[in-house]
Image: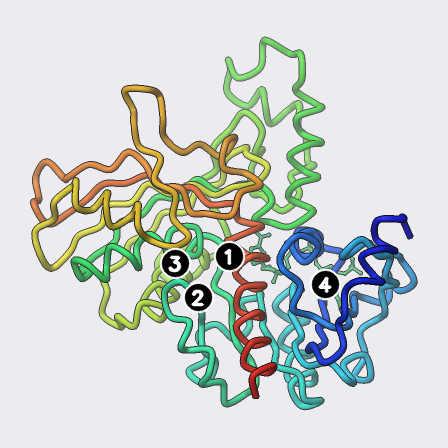
């Protein structure tokens, strides 16, 4: 323990605060979660780190202290008030109900429960009140692509009432977890310095070889119009998530949504080009004001000065950045926007932490 953390330990009284488990603490989202828990205002007593048996005994740092990772088991949830799950769908599906049965309120980052009618799907800036109705003791965190735009869309919906979203995503490698990050870096190493690449059909594929990781085509020097698994009629699971989750969060079961999800060679931060159509005519200056005033949104929209959101500037920050706002030329009720959000922060760990903090406040006040 460093002298600084030792001093903090002495001054910080955590008695009476709810206890927290971070399940999946060793993963891409879990790593960002530990960093967030170390910098946000502390509302937690004990923080317990849980992962697969492969990681048991590993030591990770949170709030300046080394904490040993424990293997997942029913007993690992004893004494835990809130359990964040940052693990694959099938792990959440199996273990979240066990944690809830042991008395923890689960905040789940996976896709296992998002569309369950008895599980609220929450973005605190948009529908924080939904947290209170959780018959299964489970609250779901939306997927990173939906989350990267929904705070801005919620603010505009509040003013103009959404009718339709047409969305193209530009999704980062880390959306596919640590394996996605590693694959992009490995592919970058393979192509670095080769100035002939990207000039003939298949040349990038030949250099990358079979090491495609979680992607169906080389990601480096490429754009891949695919994320997730194949569903009916050619849609990808990611595209259907954007549609279904936007509808549930906004409470608009009939919202028209068309999404095309695309993977780009960016490490972290998803971008979306959005055509948003509303039930009333829009005023672009007023829309800018709405976004400027919206909690969790950062308006960055001055193309004359080269100011618009890009992943390279947005990564590592909390807000949803919005720029390139234009009134549609052929539809007075529609806006065109470009939105960026760090998929590991607001797109995952930050939103989960915010939901958990809403629950912590409720438990502390009870
Ligand atoms: N990446 C994103 O942008 C993003 C955004 C929103 C939501 N999510 C969701 O968040 C979840 C985690 O994603 P990630 O990107 O962080 O994945 P990841 O990097 O692959 O990490 C997976 C984590 O789950 C743990 N785990 C795997 N199998 C387990 C088991 N049987 N029992 C207990 N723990 C187990 C791993 O522990 P070990 O290290 O011990 O294997 C690791 O800590 C997924 O459901 C994902 O869909 C991801």
Whether residue 312 is situated above or below residue 83 in the rendered picture? above
Q: Earlier in the sequence, mark 4 or mark 2?
A: 4
The answer to which image quadrant residue 218 occupies is: top right
Whether the residues at callouts 4 and 3 have beta carbons within 8 Å, the answer is: no
Mark 3: few, some, or many residues within 10 Å (few <14, many ≥20)?
many
Q: Earlier in the sequence, mark 4 or mark 3?
A: 4
Q: Of discs 3 and 1, which sits in the foreground?
A: 3
Measuring from the top left, give residue 264's x and y in whole percent: 50, 35
Query: Whole-Å distance between the Cαs marked 4 and 3?
Result: 24 Å
Q: Is residue 169 left or right of residue 206?
A: left
Q: Of discs 4 and 2, which sits in the foreground?
A: 2
Label 3 sits on a secondary structure element that is helix
Whether residue 191 is situated above or below residue 117 in the rendered picture? above
Q: Which residue is mark 1?
A: 229
Q: How is the image coloured?
A: rainbow
Q: Of discs 1 and 2, which sits in the foreground?
A: 2
Query: Whole-Å distance between the Cαs marked 1 and 2?
Result: 28 Å
Q: Is mark 4 within 8 Å of ligand 1?
A: yes
Pick the residue in front: 12 or 172.
12
Q: Which residue is mark 4?
A: 24
Pick the residue in front: 160 or 175.
160
Whether the residues at callouts 4 and 2 have beta carbons within 8 Å, the answer is: no
Q: Earlier in the sequence, mark 2 or mark 3?
A: 2
Measuring from the top left, give residue 139's x and y in whole percent: 52, 76
Q: Which residue is mark 2?
A: 124
Quadrant observed for ligand 1 in the rendered image: bottom right
Whether residue 199 is situated above or below residue 96 in the rendered picture? above
Give the residue drawn at x 58%, y 29%. 220
Q: Which residue is mark 3?
A: 242
Q: Earlier in the sequence, mark 3 or mark 1?
A: 1
């Amino acid at each position: 323990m460093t002298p600084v953390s030792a001093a903090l330990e002495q001054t910080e009284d955590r008695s009476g605060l709810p206890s927290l488990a971070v399940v999946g603490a060793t993963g891409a989202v879990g790593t960002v979660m530990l960093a967030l828990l170390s910098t946000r205002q502390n509302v937690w007593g004990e923080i317990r780190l849980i992962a697969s048996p492969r990681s048991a005994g590993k030591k990770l740092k949170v709030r300046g202290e080394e904490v040993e990772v424990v293997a997942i088991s029913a007993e690992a949830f004893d004494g835990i008030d809130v359990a964040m799950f940052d693990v694959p769908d099938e792990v959440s599906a199996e273990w979240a109900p066990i944690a809830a049965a042991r008395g923890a309120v689960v905040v789940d980052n996976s896709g296992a429960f998002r569309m369950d009618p008895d599980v609220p799907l929450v973005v605190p800036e948009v529908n924080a009140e939904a947290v209170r109705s959780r018959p299964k003791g489970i609250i779901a965190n939306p997927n990173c692509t939906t989350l990267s735009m929904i705070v801005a869309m919620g603010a505009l919906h509040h003013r103009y009432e959404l009718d339709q979203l047409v969305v193209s995503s530009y999704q980062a490698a880390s959306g596919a977890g640590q394996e996605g990050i590693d694959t992009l870096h490995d592919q970058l190493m393979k192509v670095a310095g080769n100035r002939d690449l990207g000039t003939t059909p298949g040349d990038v594929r030949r250099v990358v070889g079979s090491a495609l990781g979680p992607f169906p085509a080389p990601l480096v020097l490429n754009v891949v119009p695919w994320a997730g698994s194949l569903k009916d009629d050619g849609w990808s699971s990611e595209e259907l998530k954007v549609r279904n989750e936007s509808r549930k969060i906004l409470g608009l079961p009939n919202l028209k949504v068309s999404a095309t999800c695309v993977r780009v060679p960016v490490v972290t931060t998803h971008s979306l080009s959005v055509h948003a159509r509303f039930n009333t005519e829009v005023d672009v200056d007023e829309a800018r004001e709405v976004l400027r005033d919206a909690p969790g949104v950062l308006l960055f929209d001055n193309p004359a000065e080269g100011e618009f959101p890009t992943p390279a500037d947005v990564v590592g920050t909390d807000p949803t950045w919005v720029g390139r706002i234009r009134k549609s030329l052929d539809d007075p009720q529609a806006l065109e926007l470009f939105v960026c959000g760090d998929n590991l922060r607001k797109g995952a760990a930050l939103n989960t932490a915010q939901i958990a903090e809403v629950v912590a406040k409720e438990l502390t006040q009870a």
